[in-house]
Amino acid sequence: MSLSQPKKRVALLGLMLESNSFAPVTSRDDFLNRLYVAGDEFRAELNRTESKLPAELLSFHAAMDGAVEWEPVPILIGLVEAGGPLDHTFFEETLSEMSARLQAAMPLDGVYICNHGAMITTEDRDPDGTIFEMIRGVVGPDVPVVATLDLHGNVSDRMVQAANVVIAYQTNPHVDMIARGQDAAGALNEMFHGLRPGAAMIRLPVTPPTVTLLTETGPYADLIRYARTKVTDDILNISILGGFAYADTPKNGLAIIVTTRSGKHAAHKLAIEIAEHAWQDHERYVPALIPLEKAVAAAVRAGEDMTLGPVILADVADNPGGGANGNTTWILEALVRAGAKGGVLGIFNDPALAAQAMELGEGARFRAIFNRNAPDQYSHRFEVDATVLRIRDGDCVGRRGFYAGRRINVGTTALLDLDGVRVVVISIRTQCADPVFLEMMGIDIAKARSVVVKSRGHFRAGFDEFFTPDQVIEVDAPGLSSPVLSRFDFKYLPRPIFPIDRNVSWPPRLSALAL
């Protein structure tokens, strides 16, 4: 690179929320509890050793440092655990601040958008598209715009039209964010040297349940591998997004986005080819869960017979990473009533219970009430005698998988013993995707006979040093993130759509979108 060239000024911004339409509204406070920074505060976070920023954004920043003389222009970044629709007033305030800061930063040479892609607000079914269009409106048609999304993003036509390149994660559990940030930096630098890529998107009438979107085995893994065989020198990026059904939007559907260096025609042709291959496999996107009674029986056996291997029970229907509350008691109550020994459950979101345990202190014996909220179809309260074993402030750094290296705060945290089952209770809703949430409370996971995690799939990358895939039990229990999609009253999904509807057809000529 030449020092005589002017520095490329690149705006950095994003708002990351995966919205479950059936969950409680996500508020300003939810973002402030996790990450919401702008301007100089954003810049400071870029340079922290243990940053709260998304890994792909940090990776993009590092890759740009090594590729070009540039000046990062931090605009605003917000990140929060998956939740309900975003409060629209707060969204409008954030959008306005993003726009004002972008305009003040002009002229810009490029923009990097770090979004999740499955956000909705209380009034907007495509706020990601609204953000993308706002950015394009401010910077104009000629400034390169690159974006990274979670593979659970729901992509709208206007998102692909507003950005030059859309790059999605390729692994689930998500452990490739660093690589995707590097991809985004590489694409932007090619555009700095004159490339103007062409993109095409195909959306299929399939909304895969979350547990069918693993990338080690299953239909989605096979599709990702097939797409990789199609990469040539002309292909800038292939992204295949399974989407997030619970957002309940008209743009839901498995989406294939192809971006080429040669133009839209080649992108459209390959997108159709990949989509046709995906459609041949669409009937495989049906979840296979283990009934609660059978799962609990396996945990009980593991506690009684040390010759058996331990098991990990995934409470996939109460996954905070999918917008659930993280406080259903179905599995916990069943384990306690069955007398399971050597069991651990993490992490149970109950601020009131954690606060009570902290007030009572370590060693206290009391009547614990799990989930004091009014009962509904997804959850009810559970009362049981408990002993407070340990109290912590909940500040930690992720050790493995999805949270590796990221600073996280789960609020006041208590470890309770329910006479055989230990429970980690937290105060800030977070999915149990990392062993650190249990280990920081003194739990030796290798000695546990059964571990229950409130997580859908990211736990696999965090706990795989303790449990092999054949020790994983995905439990069928009630919850806001149940993979059994027929249990939800969807209002906006395009219908018919598989697997909610079974009589679904897909004529490619009607589904193709060349952009």
Image (cartoon, grey):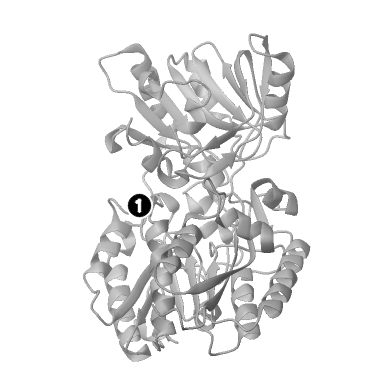
Q: Is residue 321 left or right of residue 66?
A: right
Q: Which residue is mark 1?
A: 214
Task: Say which amino acid is labelled 1.
Answer: Leu
Placement of 425 over or under 181, stated as above or below: above
Q: Quadrant of residue 505?
A: bottom left
Q: Is residue 173 left or right of residue 249?
A: left
The quarter in which the N terminus is drawn is bottom left
- Residue drawn 47% across and 83% down? 5
- Residue drawn 25% across and 74% down? 231
- Please rate how many residues cluster around mark 1, counting C-alpha atoms within 10 Å: few if below 14, some from 14 to 19, many from 20: many
- Please provide percent x and percent y for residue 274: 29, 74
Number of marks present in the image shown: 1
Placement of 228 over or under 214, stated as above or below: below
Q: Report the front residue among 362 and 477.
A: 362
- Residue 38 at least partly seen: no
- Residue 360 at least partly seen: yes
Placement of 47 over or under 505, stated as above or below: above
- Residue drawn 68% across and 61% down? 40
- Residue drawn 48% across and 41% down? 455
Q: Is residue 129 left or right of residue 473?
A: right
- Please provide percent x and percent y for residue 339: 47, 13
- Please provide percent x and percent y for residue 492: 60, 67
Q: Report the front residue among 54 and 473.
A: 54
- Please provide percent x and percent y for residue 399: 44, 38
The quarter in which the C terminus is drawn is bottom left
- For numbered disc 1, what is the local secondary structure? loop
Q: Report the front residue among 261 and 511.
A: 261
